[in-house]
């Protein structure tokens, strides 16, 4: 859409309001917690997607009366330890990051550590956006997308809150050492990318309506997670599929009117 500028649409299709590319966001998936246990965990047994998820603090699944943020997060741990991930694991300050002492620590503790994967709600902000890079172009000479975005206070508060819950989970399971990573403010490319053509009733602040069709170009439908207004704490696939299905149904039921628009 940003590349579709013309005389009729000097800012690109459906972008007279300047909203295409705005409210970009991705899932905040950082801020892991890593634990060291006094016994083996049998991490080698699992497949990459095998693990356990705790949904108690996701979105509206808990009482928010004593917290100062919107949304929440899922707490995940996986049983898929592999040699390269073991080589990158923390030594919890008990050994250097190289040499014979490091090797000995890895040999003894590679199966005694586990890290969380905490996926959190991310809110949309107009100051987080996509635009065309003014200097960088691809091999065909087309400007590439530039991302200007960061996680803000709501996401960082969720990260700190869910780290507390993850640490509690690990300690109750018998962990003897805990390492909490930084909360993580930077945002970049992601397989969970949202926004940029946000859905809403107000044409001045949204690109498409509730059916996924553009306010300014009524026969232009947009399918995908770019229409979503927030992420929630869960993966986007089923929601993106449901929204695409609704857009397709609307097109099928109103084909003649849309085609003549």
Image (cartoon, helix red, strand yellow):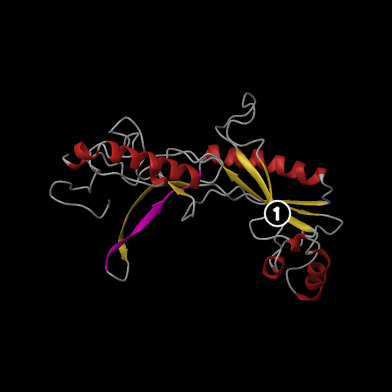
Q: Nearer the viewer, residue 106 or 206?
A: 206
Give how far across and how far down residue 202 sits, in percent.
31, 30
- 209 lies left or right of 153: left
- 73 lies left or right of 253: right
| Quadrant of res 260 | top left
Q: In the figure, 64 relative to 73: above or below? A: above
Range of magenta residues? 141-151
Q: Nearer the viewer, residue 228 or 162?
A: 228
Residue under the point 65% across and 39% down: 55
Tag 1 secondary structure: strand
Residue under the point 79% across and 73% down: 103
Give how far across and how far down residue 123 sits, in percent.
48, 38
Q: Residues within 10 Å of mark 1 (few under 14, many from 20)?
A: many
Disc tally is: 1
- 90 lies left or right of 152: right
Q: In the figure, 202 relative to 260: above or below? A: above
Residue marked by disc 1: 115
């Amino acid at each position: 859409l940003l590349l579709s500028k013309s005389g009729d649409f000097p800012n690109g299709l459906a972008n007279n309001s300047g909203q295409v590319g705005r409210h970009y966001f991705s899932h905040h998936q950082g801020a892991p917690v890593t634990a060291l246990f006094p016994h083996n965990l049998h991490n080698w047994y699992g497949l990459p997607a095998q693990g356990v998820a705790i949904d108690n603090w996701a979105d509206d699944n808990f009482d928010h009366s004593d917290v100062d943020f919107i949304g929440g997060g899922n707490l995940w741990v996986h049983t898929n330890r592999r040699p390269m991930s073991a080589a990158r694991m923390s030594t919890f300050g008990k050994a250097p990051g190289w040499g014979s002492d490091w090797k000995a620590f890895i040999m003894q503790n590679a199966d005694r550590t586990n890290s969380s994967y905490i996926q959190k709600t991310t809110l949309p902000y107009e100051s987080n956006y996509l635009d065309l890079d003014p200097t960088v172009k691809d091999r065909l000479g087309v400007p590439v997308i530039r991302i200007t975005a960061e996680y803000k206070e709501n996401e960082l508060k969720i990260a700190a809150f869910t780290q507390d819950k993850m640490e509690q989970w690990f300690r109750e399971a018998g962990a003897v050492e805990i390492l909490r990573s930084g909360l993580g403010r930077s945002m970049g490319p992601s397989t969970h990318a949202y926004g940029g053509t946000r859905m809403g009733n107000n044409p001045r602040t949204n690109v498409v309506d509730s059916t996924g069709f553009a306010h300014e170009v009524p026969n232009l439908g947009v399918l995908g997670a770019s229409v979503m207004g927030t992420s929630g704490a869960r993966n986007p696939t089923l929601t993106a599929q449901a929204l695409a299905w609704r857009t397709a149904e609307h097109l099928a039921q109103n084909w003649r009117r849309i085609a003549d628009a």
